[in-house]
């Protein structure tokens, strides 16, 4: 099985996650989240596949998130579609790394979750 690995190459967590994939012999397609940001439709599909709320796909520790006051906007009740459209405007808003398979999508690097999905 080949998975999609969506990353920001300068991110230390993304580097650690990529090393983990390599160590475990996982085949993946590497995608730079800034150069090739996910579309709103891709995000909608992946978020549905994850079973997680859309807000888990926001990079809540990022500067852009704070600059745009997104916590307050999310708390005020943005629709899922509004969230997909906003996330698609800038890869730095998206939680990373993002691991996407045929039947899962996992935002962030949690080794146990990745192992459960892949090994």
Image: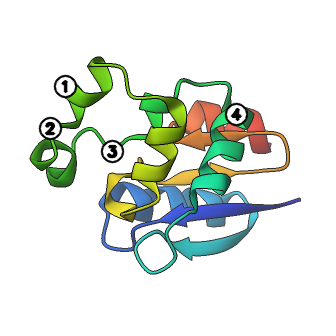
Badge 3, how many Cα within 10 Å: few under 14, some, many 20+?
Answer: many
Q: What is the CA distance from the residue labelled 4 to the residue labelled 2?
A: 25 Å
Q: What is the CA distance from the residue labelled 1 to the residue labelled 3?
A: 14 Å
Mark 3 — residue?
59
Badge 2, how many Cα within 10 Å: few under 14, some, many 20+?
Answer: few
Residue 109 in view, yes or no = no
Q: Indicate which disc, 4 or 2, sits on the residue closer to the N terminus.
A: 4
**Visual colour scheme:** rainbow
Q: Nearer the viewer, residue 108 or 38?
A: 38
Q: What is the CA distance from the residue labelled 1 to the residue labelled 4?
A: 23 Å
Left or right of residue 115: residue 57: left
Image quadrant holding the N terminus, namely bottom right
Badge 4, how many Cα within 10 Å: few under 14, some, many 20+?
Answer: some
Residue at position x 75%, y 39% in the image: 104
Q: What is the CA distance from the residue labelled 3 to the residue labelled 4?
A: 18 Å
Q: Indicate which disc, 3 or 2, sits on the residue closer to the N terminus.
A: 3
- Of circles 1 and 4, the one toward us is 1
Secondary structure found at label 3? loop
**Residue 68: % across, % down:** 16, 46
Please identify the quarter of the rendering in which residue 116 is found. top right
Report if the CB atoms under discs 1 and 2 are less than 8 Å apart: yes
Q: What is the CA distance from the residue labelled 3 to the residue labelled 2?
A: 12 Å
Q: What is the CA distance from the residue labelled 1 to the residue labelled 2?
A: 6 Å
Residue 37 in view, yes or no = yes
Above or below residue 54? Residue 92 is below
Mark 2 — residue?
69
- Of circles 1 and 3, the one toward us is 1
Mark 4 — residue?
48
């Amino acid at each position: 099985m080949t998975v999609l690995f969506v990353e920001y190459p300068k991110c230390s967590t993304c580097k650690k996650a990529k090393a983990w994939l390599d160590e475990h012999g996982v085949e993946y397609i590497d995608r730079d989240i800034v150069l090739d940001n996910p579309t709103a439709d891709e995000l909608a599909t992946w978020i549905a596949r994850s079973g997680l709320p859309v807000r888990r796909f926001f990079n809540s520790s990022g500067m852009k998130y704070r600059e745009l006051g997104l916590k307050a906007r999310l708390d005020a009740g943005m629709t899922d579609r509004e969230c997909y459209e906003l996330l698609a405007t800038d890869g730095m808003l998206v939680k990373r790394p993002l691991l996407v398979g045929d039947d899962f999508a996992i935002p962030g690097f949690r080794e146990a979750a990745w192992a459960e999905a892949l090994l």
